[in-house]
Image (spheres, rainbow, N blue to C red):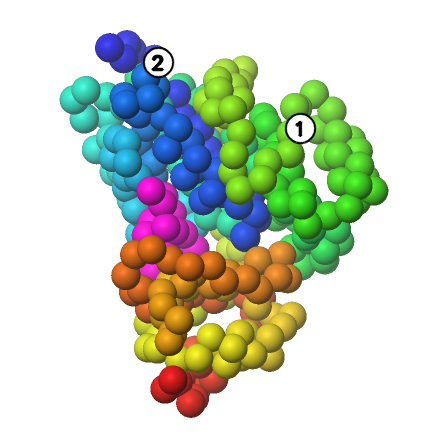
Amino acid sequence: MTHIGTVPLTIISGFLGSGKTSLLNHLLTQSGPENGGRTITAMVNDFGELNIDAELIAAKHGSQIALANGCVCCSIGDDLMRSFMEVMQQSPLPDHIIIEASGVAEPSRIAGFASVDRQLRLNGIVTLVDAGAHNVHSNDPYLADNYVKQIEAAHLLLISKPDLADAGTLENLENDLAAKKPNVPIAQVTRGVLPIDLVLELNAAEGIWQPHEVIEHGFTQWATHLPKQPRAALIAKLESLRPHVLRAKGVLHDDEGAYVLHLAGGRISTEPHKGEASGHFVLIGKPQMPDAATLEKIFRKNEAA
């Protein structure tokens, strides 16, 4: 039974494409009554008109809540509050609540919602850092401020995709993170796999977190449904938009079948998708990214396979 003040809230943070969904998938898969573990309510938010992250999460345990569009900390404060209230009215209550924050969210702002119900407590903020993209993000004058705030808010830092970096890069990254957060544990994680208690038993010291007013993050977004088209052609269109596109994600299909497409950390990748391809496609970029009308023309030109 869950008692007053004992429902822990964990926030999974990290810049666009850092591996948050993979980590959440692992936590959900390794928890649940059938494994003798916790029941988890996952609150999922993606920066875009379409909550693509929600379709990719294997929410087998507890309730999964896909929030409306926008950053948790910026544009949907009312929806987040209502979602918390709905979760805390469940019977029985979940053993743990996890929020997968948007890639451009400031997690310290989200943590303020731990005070909305006296049964909630902040377990901690986990920030994932993409080993292959850290230097680019931390030195980009447009991205660095938001990126560093995510690191500074963390109670646990996870270096994701270590297989994409050499030993020297990983050592420099760990030293850099340790300098920024000297008292915070740092670990490497590949495809989100780690001992789940490392995340779910942080028990971070309680702090005074207050929600902030709406902020302007300056990113632009575009979302659509794409029909079937050759994968290579779609990737070529994405390549033509560098460096203004920071993140792309889609659940798409071509002659080879359904697949998930990612652009993250400057890398474009695809992987098979077991479910039905919805055609959902989202781009997140700098203000210099082409407008919606131009993007429609680019991605719908010669779309037939």
- Identify residue for label 1: 186
Q: Position of residue 299 (x, y in %)?
A: 44, 81
The residue under the point 37% across, 33% down is 29
Toward the viewer: 267 or 222?
267
User: From which residue to which does the magenta span run?
Assistant: 44-58
Q: Position of residue 152 (x, y in %)?
A: 64, 34
Considering the image in quadrants, where does the C terminus appear? bottom left
Residue at the extreme left of the image, as rendered: 91
Among numbered discs 1 and 2, the one appearing first in the sequence: 2
Say whether residue 1 is visible: yes
Residue at the extreme bottom of the image, as rendered: 302
> How far apart are the two marked residues, 1 and 2, measured between alpha carbons?
26 Å
The residue under the point 46% across, 48% down is 102
The residue under the point 83% across, 42% down is 168
Badge 2 density bin: few <14, some 14–19, many ≥20, Cα 10 Å: some
Q: Is residue 93 magenta?
A: no
Q: Is residue 149 above or below residue 254?
A: above
Quadrant of the rendered image containing residue 258: bottom left
Q: Are marks 1 and 2 in contact (CB under 8 Å)?
A: no
Q: Is residue 47 above or below residue 14?
A: below
Q: Is residue 57 magenta?
A: yes
**Hey, what amino acid is under mark 2?**
Thr
**Hey, what amino acid is under mark 1?**
Ile
Q: Which mark is residue 6?
A: 2
